[in-house]
Image: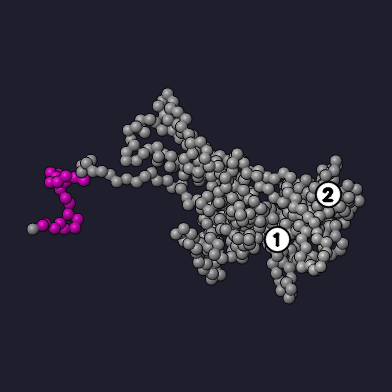
Amino acid sequence: MTEVLEPGTQIDTDQPAQSLSTAAARNLATTTKSVPQMQGITSRWLLRKLPWVEAAGGAYRVNRRLSYVVGDGRLTFTNVGDNVSVVPGELRELALLRDFQDPDSEAILAALAERFTQREYAQGEVIVEFGHQADALHLIAHGKVDKAGVGKYGEPTRLGVLAGGDYFGDQELAASDGIWEFTARAVTRCTVLSLSKRAFAEQLDRSEALRAHVEAGPGTDGRVLNDHGEAAIDVASGHAGEPAIPSTFVDYELAPREYELSVAQTVLRMHTRVADLYNKPMDQLDQQLRLTIEALRERQEHEIVNNREFGLLHSADMGMRVPTRNGPPTPDEFDELLAMVWKEPGFFLAHPRTIAAFGRECTKRGIYPTGVDVGGHKIPAWRDIPIFPCNKIPVSESHASSVMLMRVGEQNQGVVGLHQTGIPDEYQPGLSVRFMGINDNAITSYLVSAYYSAAVLVPDALAVLEDVEVGRTDSEG
């Protein structure tokens, strides 16, 4: 009969063992083991979904039609304490002052910058009102401004949000008397620099060069422009009889941008004794290379997002950047991105915390968007456009991030990844592992190199939603 011990009964450990212990038995057993794990490996959806284009010669030239830029950039400001001023040279971002070149241009722009007056607006305060006389240029140095107009039937219509560096009223400076076609209201506390028509006219009277430039208008060689700032291609249609057919030509940029392949490198070192004696059941070099390559690919994705030369967050055109209206990412703002990249949008890219914040905003409105299947993975989506997570998109200390929406592929004039295959000692496409030799300490060295870049073929292929608040508020629990 088997003796059953009462709960709490102490077992006499001094008695001799009657069978082999598990600790001793493990000395004869074959241990089942995993390959080395690495917490830093992510899904890297951006690298997986970007179409990769061969960049022979290590460079990729993006040829475009000639565009006449009409001041769609953002202005830069400086401050001394509470006194804010615009950088004079930045005034060339305005359509009226684009390409203003004169021996005294710097002095003229500096004098013009001094004529701006600074004003602070509280949250909710009106800066300009619909129907009132448009009599000034306004530069937003800090804060957010909501633009609201009037629809066809008199209903209020939101026209967008302006943020620091944006401006409005520049065309009104040189135009005849008109009215504001919208109301601009401060969403947050704002610092605004304003230049009245009267002050601008006085500066024109003091500078003949500036007056001549303003009267000449933007330098378009007299050609009609399309909505994208390109010289229009004259085409006749719907005619009958024998009218004169217009002649035209398509001009190209004379200095197109070239993207040179960037590189991420490291030197992998391993003692020959490790490679000789400890290679079973797993090859030590293979495992070392696997984890090293994973780290290089993570850096590659980080650079494609954040690099100041070719990173997508920095390559987005200024006209394709929009701030959030109230902070959190809402369905309205995702729709605004889709309205900007409406020609075959490919996918959204956002930090996982941003995706969670978007989900909370959808839940608040009683919206429960369904995901889409991507290669067997259920991915969150909006309007059937997948929202891929990417932890390489930074989240600032103030819990603000960005959301990108892009069109991809050369055929779609979208965003493409750049690499070169067939390189010496290629281990993976665009990645090489080169043996560097064995030193006097019997340590083998391998140079691991990954070559890559990314290009935005046309400006409207990439839109960025900026200043997205991803922190949970107190009201959200």
For residue 284, which numbered disc appears in the image? none
Q: In this view, does 206 lie to the left or right of 43?
A: right
Which amino acid, by three-letter code, is at mark 1?
A: Val
Residue 147 x/y as whole percent = 72, 64
Q: How far apart are marks 1 and 2 (CA)?
A: 24 Å
Numbered disc 1: secondary structure: strand
Residue 188 x/y as whole percent = 67, 60
Q: In this view, does 252 lie to the left or right of 417?
A: right
For residue 9: magenta? yes
Q: In this view, does 187 lie to the left or right of 107?
A: left
Numbered disc 2: secondary structure: helix
- Residue 326 is drawn in which quadrant? bottom right
Mark 2 Cα shell of 10 Å, populated few (<14), some (14-19), many (≥20):
some
Which amino acid, by three-letter code, is at mark 2?
A: Leu
Mark 1 Cα shell of 10 Å, populated few (<14), some (14-19), many (≥20):
many
* Tag 1 residue: 145
On screen, residue 457 above or below 265: below
Residue 146 x/y as whole percent = 70, 63
On screen, residue 475 above or below 268: below
For residue 165: magenta? no
On screen, residue 236 above or below 90: below
Residue range (magenta): 2-23
In primary-sequence order, the first of circles 1 and 2 is 2
- Residue 247 is drawn in which quadrant? bottom right
Residue depicted at 61% across the width and 64% down the height: 335
* Tag 2 residue: 112
Residue 151 x/y as whole percent = 73, 72
Task: Report the quarter where the N terminus lies.
Answer: bottom left
Residue depicted at 67% across the width and 53% down the height: 459
